[in-house]
Image: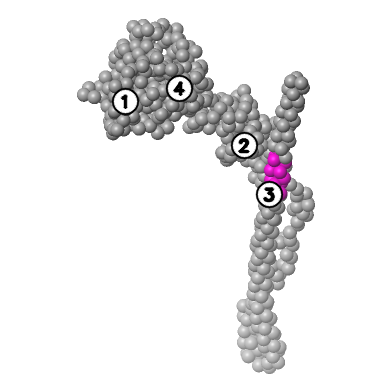
Amino acid sequence: MEAQKEALQRIISTLANKNEEIQNFIDTLNHTLKGVQANSSNVIAELDEEFDGLYAILDEMKESMTNSIKQEQAHKSQELQNQLSQCSNALENSEELLEFAARSLDIKDPEEFSKAARQIKDRVTMASAFRISLKPKVSDNMTHLMVDFSQERQMLQALKFLPVPKAPEIDPVECLVADNAVTIVWRMPEEDNKIDHFVLEYRKTNFDGLPRVKDETCWELIDYIKGTEYTLSGLKFDSKYMNLRVRACNKAVAGEYSDPVTLETKALVFNLDNTSSHLNLKVEDSYVEWDPTGGKGQENKIKGKENKGSGTPSPKRTSVSSRSPSIRGSRDRFTGESYTVLGDTAIESGQHYWEVRAQKDCKSYSVGVAYKNLGKFDQLGKTNTSWCIHVNNWLQTTFAAKHNNKAKALDMTVPDRIGVYCDFDGGQLSFYNASSKQLLYTFKTKFTQPLLPGFMVWCGGLALSTGLQVPSAVKMLQKSENGLSGSASSLTNVTQ
């Protein structure tokens, strides 16, 4: 009976999963159908716009050519009219001279006849009829302004849809995720000299693969990429993965998107745990500030309580990639002079990096890590379960690495931002100048319990930057540091 129930339960579970897959596919089909309808309307509108533009060009060309013909007609007409006028005047003068010559033939007096003959000779010599050209200056031929549209007609008759660019192919091997930047590389399956630019889209996700339609986040778009490589920089890696896809565009149309690739972009993301922070600390997610009035009214409640030290119950182990409610509210608040706040996410494996920036007028602060069982009266660096670097700007500036109530003075300038590198498996905790990546100090030990980022602040404030990958420069420095010795119990042999 129980075996049959288990078998039936498996069948029901399988059927339920299949139903969910089918429903998801139906959602995809409906989404695609709406896209087809919308995109069809868009391309028809674009086609109308293109043809309207073509008609406008033809009308403009027709008007320009018509004007050229009219100008040629006017020029030739004017030239011929001028010739006609000249010829009419010459003909009129010639007829008058001819009539005068005919009358002169009737003169009987030799002297008068001789005088008339000389006049006729002079007038004939100067007559315009003998100086004008009897050839038209222009012809009536207008064939030089004729247009042969046979080639253009063939081109228009051969007009068809511009070939859609093929989908690019993303090369996952060439893609790089480093320094909170993602470099994506792609290529075309075949050469296409009509491609004008590429469009890149990306979105963050916690799915190992493509998210379902109902769970999709919006794609972020980068347009007009001229090359076949692009780097997304300045990202906060607050999700496990990133989907990326690319499509090619020519002057008129965009091709299909490439098959999306999913790149792992996991990094440590945490906030400050305000449920157990000292009452004199004002905590807001990734910012903590000293508040001298925060403990008013609570002093009587905390006064007289004994320091339970390392006997504080440890919360349940949690994954580095999740925030467990067992951390929040599972311990008493820090009190006394332990102006401390811890991160809300435990580190129990892997390599992680985060940065801290202190206010310029901050009098005293510490940055480091601690086991979960750090006592509520304990201060960072003064127990064997916490490691930190401490900055004191009160009266005179001191800069030191602290662990197990021992301090090592650091002879260097305090940076504006401190980078913290934690290699849990390798037993290494290093601090860096976050801007120059100069190594400030390295603790080497064997971590035996999950770690929590820890912070102490007095008279000032600290701002955290999480969701950061381990910088490449830090990775290189760590390779050279791995050959050096360290100690878990003292600062004597700790590298710096």
Q: Rounded to the nearest whole Å, what is the CA distance between mark 3 and mark 4?
A: 46 Å
Sooner in the amino-acid sequence: mark 2 or mark 3: 3
Residue underneath mark 1: 302
Q: How is the image coloured?
A: one colour
Disc 1 vs disc 2: Cβ atoms closer than 8 Å?
Answer: no
Q: Does residue 388 appear to the left or right of 107 in the view shown? A: left
Instruction: Please identify the quadrant where the N terminus is shown.
Output: top right
Q: Does residue 14 belong to the magenta stretch?
A: no
Q: Earlier in the sequence, mark 2 or mark 4?
A: 2
The quarter of the rendered structure image containing the C terminus is top left
The residues bearing labels 1 and 3 have C-alpha atoms spaced at a distance of 65 Å
Q: Which mark is residue 215?
A: 2
Q: State the image quarter where residue 228 is shown.
A: top right
Secondary element type, mark 2: helix
Residue type at mark 1: give it: Ile
The amino acid type found where label 4 is placed reads: Tyr
Q: Could you tell me what secondary structure mostly forms the magenta stretch?
A: helix
C-alpha span from label 4 to label 1: 35 Å
**Where does the magenta region start and end?**
27-38
